[in-house]
Amino acid sequence: FMIDLLTLFKKDSNLLNTKSNFIIKKICKSLNSEKVYISLSHVLLKIFNDDISNIDFIKIIVQILNNNLIIAPELNDLRLKLTKNNNSIDNKILLTNLFKCWSINPPSLICISLLTSNYSLSYKIINQMVNYEININTLIQLDLLIQLLESPIFAKLRLDLLKPIKNINLFKCLYGLLMLLPQSNSFKILQNRLQSISSIINLPNIENNNSINEEINQDFDNEVLNFFNNCQ
């Protein structure tokens, strides 16, 4: 079914542009959203591995899936499971499947990394992005990401800014985004957010502190980063 759905989207650009969000949300509402996303991830990766010329289409689908994951009410259960960030085997399998597929679209990978509090990975991804072409579409997606960071779903991330020693990689990631973005309205939004908590941090003094989570997730980070680099 998922193969047929993606084939239909690929053949009919009008359907992709106008109805894909609606169709995916309805499928997730009718079926198990986690299984839907894992299944779509597997199919997209197979399409990518079979023919790299499909990369632009896959990037569009990943962007659509990511946007729905962040804002669609129909995916609330999946969103909650991801943000729990527990160490269960099921959750690790879910994260690995999504992260590998999302690697094809760097802004979406950064978004899901931030959503799941994988701040070390998100910072590493931004560092890797400068080794590849950053086109207008990528900048537009990063611009939209900054706006999403102000939404309720990212409330935890904003509160994590109050713990600069523990979350140094979150600061590095957000400042990295500032360096990549042109000085647009989203640039000013993120800059103002970081300035609003500047009085409680002293970045030079915490630069040498290593996050416990970074050490625990080192293997996972390396696995995703290797896959990310292979997708570019």
Image (cartoon, helix red, strand yellow):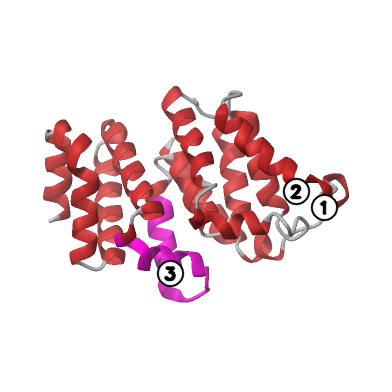
Residue 182's x, y, as percent? 58, 23
* Residue 130, above or below 38: above
Which residue matches tag 3?
81
> Could you say which quadrant of the image residue 1 lies in?
bottom left
> Do the residues bearing badges 2 and 1 touch, measured as CB atoms within 8 Å?
yes
Q: Residue at x 50, y 35 (%)?
A: 142
Which residue matches tag 1?
200
Which residue matches tag 2?
197
The secondary element bearing badge 3 is classed as: helix
Magenta range: 74-100
The secondary element bearing badge 1 is classed as: helix
Q: Is residue 76 magenta?
A: yes
Residue 168's x, y, as percent? 73, 52
Q: Is residue 200 left or right of residue 226?
A: right
| Position of the C terminus by quadrant | top left
Mark nearer the N terminus (3 vs 2):
3
Between residues 129 and 30, which one lies in front from this camera angle? 30
Q: CA distance from mark 2 to mark 1?
A: 6 Å
Residue 98's x, y, as percent? 39, 56
Check disc 2: other Cα within 10 Å, few if <14, some if 14-19, many if 20+: few
